[in-house]
Amino acid sequence: MANIHAKIDCIGLFCPMPIVKIREAIRTVPVGGMVEMLSDDPASEADMKSWSRRTGHDLLEITKDGAVWRFVVKKTR
């Protein structure tokens, strides 16, 4: 996917750290910019869906490869 502005690796980190890291990363990109996050926290999918609903940012992609989740979030504001 083009236009990934920041990539964060949260493998080995557990709740709430992946959300803390995505919140920090989203602040560093321009509106319309995208952040990719990798996480192996089993709660990541539910946490990211909840976080994106609360913050209004677009969760564009959720994929899973083995134990690793990949999320792509677009900053909306």
Image (tube, rainbow, N blue to C red):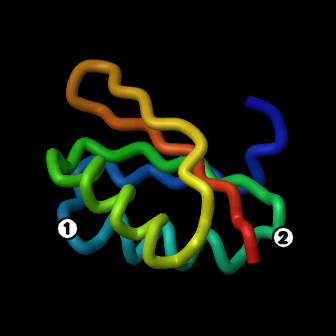
What quarter of the picture does the C terminus occupy?
A: bottom right
Q: Is residue 59 above or below residue 50?
A: above
Q: Is residue 6 above or below residue 22?
A: above
Q: Amino acid at mark 2?
A: Pro
Q: Indicate the secondary structure of the residue bearing disc 1.
A: loop
Which quarter of the figure has residue 15? Answer: bottom left
Residue nearer the viewer, 35 or 60: 60
Q: Is residue 24 above or below residue 72?
A: below
- Residue that mark 1 sits on: 15
For label 2, count other residues whose C-alpha is less than 10 Å away and answer few (under 14), some (14-19) or many (20+). few
- Residue that mark 2 sits on: 30
Residue nearer the viewer, 12 or 31: 31
What quarter of the picture does the N terminus occupy?
A: top right
Left or right: 43, with 60 as reference point = left
Q: Residue at x 63, y 71 (%)?
A: 26
Q: Residue at x 33, y 46 (%)?
A: 39
